[in-house]
Amino acid sequence: MAREALRSEAARLILLDRVPLRQEAENEDVRTVDLRDAAAVESALPEPTAFSTWAG
């Protein structure tokens, strides 16, 4: 349910999980990473840009 709501709101949705997920929409970017490994999670995310909502 949350995934569907986010998908309709975002131009690009990056999904990280420890188990393989299936891409369900064109704007989803699915990546499998060990969520306990902070470095792996950080490297799976794109570099923030001035247009990113999480950029400071």
Image (cartoon, rainbow, N blue to C red):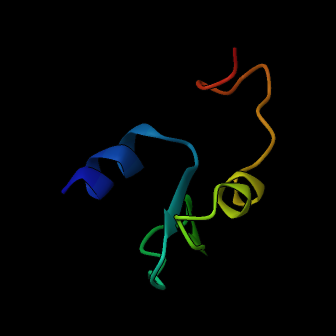
Q: Is residue 35 above or below residue 53?
A: below
Left or right, 52 with reference to 25: right
Residue extending farthest to the left is 1
Q: Residue at x 81, y 41 (%)?
A: 47
Quadrant hosting residue 41:
bottom right
What's the residue at 67%, 27% (across, down)?
Answer: 52
The answer to whether residue 7 is left or right of residue 10 is left
Q: Where is residue 28? Give x, y as percent.
A: 53, 62
Instruction: From the top left corner, tell me how far across and down residue 32 is, in percent.
Output: 58, 77
54, 22: nearer the viewer: 54
Going by the picture, which residue comes out furthest to the top? 56
Q: Position of residue 34 (x, y in %)?
A: 57, 73
Out of 17 and 49, give the one closest to the viewer.
17
Q: Is residue 24 left or right of residue 31?
A: left
* Image quarter of the N terminus: bottom left
Task: Say which quarter of the image contains residue 54.
Answer: top right
